[in-house]
Image: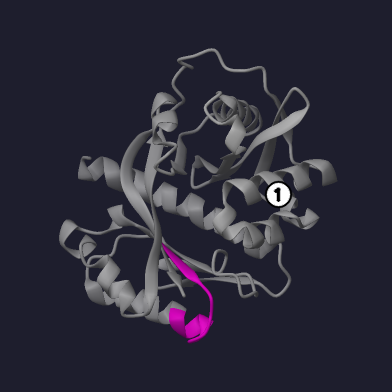
Amino acid sequence: MDATVLQQWMAPMAANLAHTMRSFADAEPGAHVQQIPHATLVDVGQHLAAFNSVILQEPVDEEAQLHQSIATAKQHFGASGAWSYWVGEGFFDPLLRRQISNIFGRYRLRRASTAPGMVADQLAPPKRVLPPLQVRRVTDDATRLSFCHLMSVGFEGSAHQLTSMYSRPHFWHGAFRGFVGTIDGRDVTAGATVVAGGVLGIYAVATLPDAMRRGYAEALMRQAVEEVFADCGAMPLVLQSSMMALPLYRRMGFESITNFSLYCTG
């Protein structure tokens, strides 16, 4: 990836991710958001590592700068706090990038996951006939509970933390838009969007195991994007993909430009 193109995308991707994580704090009494060196710190006021998060927002040229950012976050959350740090690897030069895991390890933060960061100026036309999925916006108890169920199945490793946030009615009054897809009366897939940083971010896409590889997630995302564009206008799209979903997103016109790694306590 050309360095100029990479830097063009990094700031919007990081800004969108930070705004997404901030959505969880905005819905919680006692939570707060602050800027720390090179990053945004989101504290939801609970012992939830997935949502007490730090998101790197700008290039880091020297190892000392990354140490300063991590140390500031660690001091905020405390020695026994539960928190995580999102790192867009495109913010580092190749030499420093190779040291990231070791640097975080000094603060007892382990790499929990790495996801390809993907971008698209626009969606490519469908390459197959998609199913006639009914897509509903998360606006009421029924859609909220269905969204929580689909998240708990699709992201079983963090199901409790996810549903503890998504089940709260006031969470859905912010920038986070949720969508549930139904086929033959059964809710089979869900996903979310966030508009921030001049791009549309796609998040939390999950499908029931026995409904995978039938085009449901793609149909849901295309309808969700169409709805957002109708309200906000067309814009570039970004996401962090699982390895399993890479072929789908590539068919939809996304290109991998960097990795986003998540470092967590515990």
Residue 84 is covered by the magenta coloring: yes
Relative vertical location of residue 91 with respect to residue 69 in this rendering, above or below: above
Question: Residue 245's x, y, as percent?
Answer: 44, 37
Residue 221 is inside the magenta segment: no
Specify the quadrant of the image occupied by residue 142. top right
Badge 1 amino acid:
Cys
Going 70% across and 47% down the picture, which residue do you hit? Answer: 149
Decide if residue 5 is on the left or right side of residue 95: right
Q: Residue furthest left?
A: 95
Q: Residue furthest top?
A: 129
Q: Secondary structure at mark 1?
A: helix
Task: Please identify the quadrant where the N terminus is shown.
Answer: top left
Residue under label 1: 148
Residues rendered magenta in the picture: 74-86
Can residue 190 be seen in the rendering of this structure? yes
Picture residue at 40% right of the left edge, 37% below the top: 119
Position of 208 relative to 88 (above/below): above
Crowd band around label 1 with a 10 angstrom C-alpha radius: few (<14), some (14–19), many (20+): many
**Residue 145 or residue 256, whichever sits in front:** 145
Most foreground residue, 37 or 110: 110
Figure check: 130 above or below 40? above
**Residue 114 picture location, percent across and down:** 37, 54
